[in-house]
């Protein structure tokens, strides 16, 4: 019956660069991340949510870099 949406953006950075085993040095940007959260209230006993999260890796990580997705759902019954 009731649906709410929350969108969040994160810029993730390190305080300092790091040195890799091959002698190269990383950047300070860990990456960018977005989250989309939908929360559902069906009635006073049943709620749930759906979360989608996407991460773009930055130059802090050694190549080859990989982006990532995360999806989670929850359904809760209270009594």
Image (cartoon, rainbow, N blue to C red):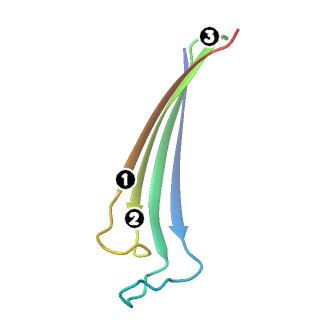
Q: Residue 31 appears in which quarter of the rendering? A: bottom left
Mark 2 or 3: in front is 2
Residue 48, above or below 24? above
User: Where is residue 38 drawn, in percent x and y?
Assistant: 50, 32
* Disc on res. 43: 3
Query: What residue is at 32 percent from the left and 61 percent from the top?
Result: 66
* Other-residue count near label 3 (Cα within 10 Å), few / some / many at <14 / 14–19 / ≥20: few
Query: What residue is at 53 percent from the left and 28 percent from the top?
Result: 49
Image quadrant occupied by the C terminus: top right
Q: Residue 4 appears in which quarter of the rendering? A: top right
Compare residues 75 and 24 and report the one nearer the observer.
24
Compare residues 36 and 18 and report the one nearer the observer.
18
Direction bottom: furthest residue: 23
Q: Is there a contact, CB below 8 Å, between mark 1 and mark 2?
A: yes
Q: Is residue 75 visible?
A: yes
Closer to the chain start, of discs 1 and 3, is 3
Query: Real-space Cα distance between discs 1 and 2?
Result: 8 Å
Query: Real-space Cα distance between discs 2 and 3?
Result: 39 Å
Q: Secondary structure at mark 1?
A: strand
Q: Secondary structure at mark 2?
A: strand
Closer to the chain start, of discs 2 and 3, is 3
* Other-residue count near label 2 (Cα within 10 Å), few / some / many at <14 / 14–19 / ≥20: some
* Disc on res. 57: 2
Residue 74, above or below 70? above
Direction right: furthest residue: 79
User: Where is residue 7 drawn, in percent x and y?
Assistant: 51, 44
User: Where is residue 44 drawn, in percent x and y?
Assistant: 67, 11
Residue beneath disc 1:
68
């Amino acid at each position: 019956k009731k649906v709410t949406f929350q969108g969040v953006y994160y810029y993730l950075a390190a305080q300092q660069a790091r040195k890799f085993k091959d002698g190269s040095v990383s950047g300070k940007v860990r990456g960018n991340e977005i989250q989309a959260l939908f929360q559902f209230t069906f009635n006073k006993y049943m709620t749930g949510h759906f979360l989608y999260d996407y991460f773009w890796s930055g130059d802090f990580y050694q190549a080859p870099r990989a982006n990532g997705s995360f999806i989670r759902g929850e359904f809760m019954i209270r009594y």
